[in-house]
């Protein structure tokens, strides 16, 4: 409950036109002290104003004119240091303001127009380096905003129009080298987006339409050679895919449909020979698959179903003779398996049930 102590009203020679000094107490130790006049039974603040959290701690000071906040106002930390300064005009923030860290270092500075941020807003970290530069127009972001790393180097630039991202976007490494460059709209990225390595070489090039990937996306090795080529449609991989070794030789080929691998996919050794070849269905390994040695001879072959080995599989020695043979049932070994030497002699027989080894027989070449 507020209680006005009229007994504390002082008549000071410095106060004119009937002004008096008022002290008003609140619950606890808080109170305000201000200059004002009494008109028609109402107390009107007019002149200097102070608000205290207790007799030793000032919280706020400023000036009233005809009961409206006007001019410079200051907010204090409990230590007595300035926390913020504002300019008021008829009870509204209007003009420059500043915020400070408890140490006294400047934290933020900008301007208000009729209680709304207007113009440039600068924020600094406690090391006094720039942290952010933002631009406002009647309370909404408008113009190019910049964000900085702790060391003060530029991190990002984004253009805004009427509160929405709309224009140039750039991001930088802490070293100052360019990392991203593109254009953002309220719908997201549009047109080309280029990503760079810190050495300045292009890392990725892609094209956006209304915030979604569309068309061919290219990625590159650190040294600048093309690494992959991927087709996109409606933000999903859709179409042919190509992956290359740094020397330009093909590493992998295949096809995507709605982000799923489908059809025949091939992977290659660096020497250009086929490493693996087989099919996908709904992004899962499916059908006949073959794995090759680097010289092109078959290493193993069999079938997949629902992404796991299913059916008879054969494994071969480098001389093309059978190394082992057996069956899988949905990814688990099942039934009899045989292992052979490179010369064709049976070395081992085993029985599996649901992936568990239940019987094994070691054989010698003489057997």
Image (tube, rainbow, N blue to C red):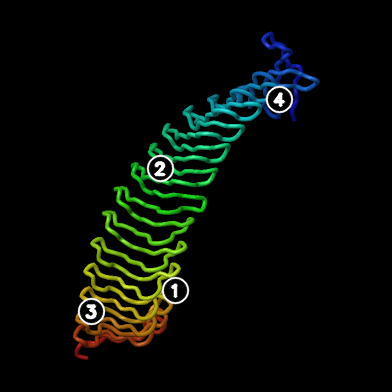
115 left or right of 120 in image: right
| Residue under pointer 1 | 282
| Residue under pointer 4 | 25
If you read the primary sequence from the N terminus, does the residue marked by circle 2 or circle 1 appear first? 2
Q: Are marks 4 and 3 in contact (CB under 8 Å)?
A: no
If you read the primary sequence from the N terminus, does the residue marked by circle 3 or circle 2 appear first? 2
Distance of label 2 from label 4 (alpha carbons): 49 Å
Q: Residue 59 at x, y = what percent?
A: 60, 26
Of circles 1 and 4, the one toward us is 1
| Residue under pointer 3 | 297
For mark 1, give the secondary structure.
loop
Tell which of 239 and 195 is nearer to you. 239
Question: Which corner quadrant holds the C terminus?
Answer: bottom left
For mark 3, give the secondary structure.
loop
Tell which of 116 and 155 is nearer to you. 116
137 left or right of 240 in image: right
Distance of label 4 from label 3 (alpha carbons): 95 Å
| Residue under pointer 2 | 155
Q: Would you say residue 359 is visible in this rendering?
A: no
Distance of label 3 from label 2 (alpha carbons): 53 Å
Tell me if mark 3 has few (under 14), some (14-19) or many (20+) residues whose alpha carbon lies within 10 angstroms of its own. Answer: some
Find residue 195 and name its label.
none
For mark 2, give the secondary structure.
strand
Q: Residue 353 at x, y = what percent?
A: 40, 84
Distance of label 2 from label 1 (alpha carbons): 41 Å
For mark 4, give the secondary structure.
strand
309 left or right of 16 in image: left
Q: Vertical placement of 228 versus 304: above or below?
A: above
Q: Residue 229 falls in which quadrant of the image? A: bottom left
């Amino acid at each position: 409950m507020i209680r006005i102590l009229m007994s504390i009203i002082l008549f000071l020679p410095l106060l004119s036109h009937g002004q008096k000094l008022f002290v008003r107490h609140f619950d606890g130790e808080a109170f305000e002290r201000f200059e004002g006049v009494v008109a028609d039974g109402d107390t009107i603040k007019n002149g200097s104003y102070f608000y205290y959290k207790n007799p030793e701690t000032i919280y706020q000071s400023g000036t009233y004119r005809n009961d409206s906040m006007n001019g410079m106002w200051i907010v204090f930390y409990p230590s007595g240091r300035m926390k913020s300064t504002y300019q008021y005009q008829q009870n509204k923030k209007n003009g420059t303001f500043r915020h400070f860290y408890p140490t006294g270092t400047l934290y933020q500075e900008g301007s208000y127009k009729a209680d709304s941020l207007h113009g440039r807003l600068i924020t600094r970290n406690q090391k006094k380096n720039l942290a952010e530069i933002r631009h406002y127009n009647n309370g909404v972001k408008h113009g190019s905003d910049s964000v900085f790393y702790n060391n003060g180097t530029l991190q990002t630039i984004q253009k805004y129009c009427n509160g929405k991202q709309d224009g140039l976007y750039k991001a930088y490494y802490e070293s100052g080298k360019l990392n991203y460059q593109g254009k953002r709209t309220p719908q997201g990225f549009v047109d080309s987006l280029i990503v760079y390595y810190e050495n300045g070489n292009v890392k990725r090039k892609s094209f956006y339409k209304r915030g979604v990937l569309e068309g061919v996306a290219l990625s590159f090795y650190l040294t600048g050679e093309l690494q992959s080529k991927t087709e996109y449609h409606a933000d999903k991989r859709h179409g042919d895919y190509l992956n290359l070794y740094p020397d330009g030789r093909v590493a992998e080929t295949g096809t995507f449909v709605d982000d799923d691998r489908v059809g025949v996919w091939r992977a290659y050794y660096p020497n250009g020979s086929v490493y693996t070849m087989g099919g996908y269905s709904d992004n899962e390994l499916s059908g006949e698959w073959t794995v090759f040695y680097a010289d092109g001879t078959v290493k193993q072959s069999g079938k997949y179903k629902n992404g796991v080995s299913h059916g008879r599989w054969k494994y071969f020695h480098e001389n093309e003779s059978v190394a082992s043979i057996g069956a899988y049932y949905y990814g688990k070994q099942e039934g009899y398996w045989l292992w052979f030497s490179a010369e064709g002699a049976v070395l081992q027989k085993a029985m599996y049930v649901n992936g568990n080894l239940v019987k094994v027989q070691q054989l010698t070449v003489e057997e």
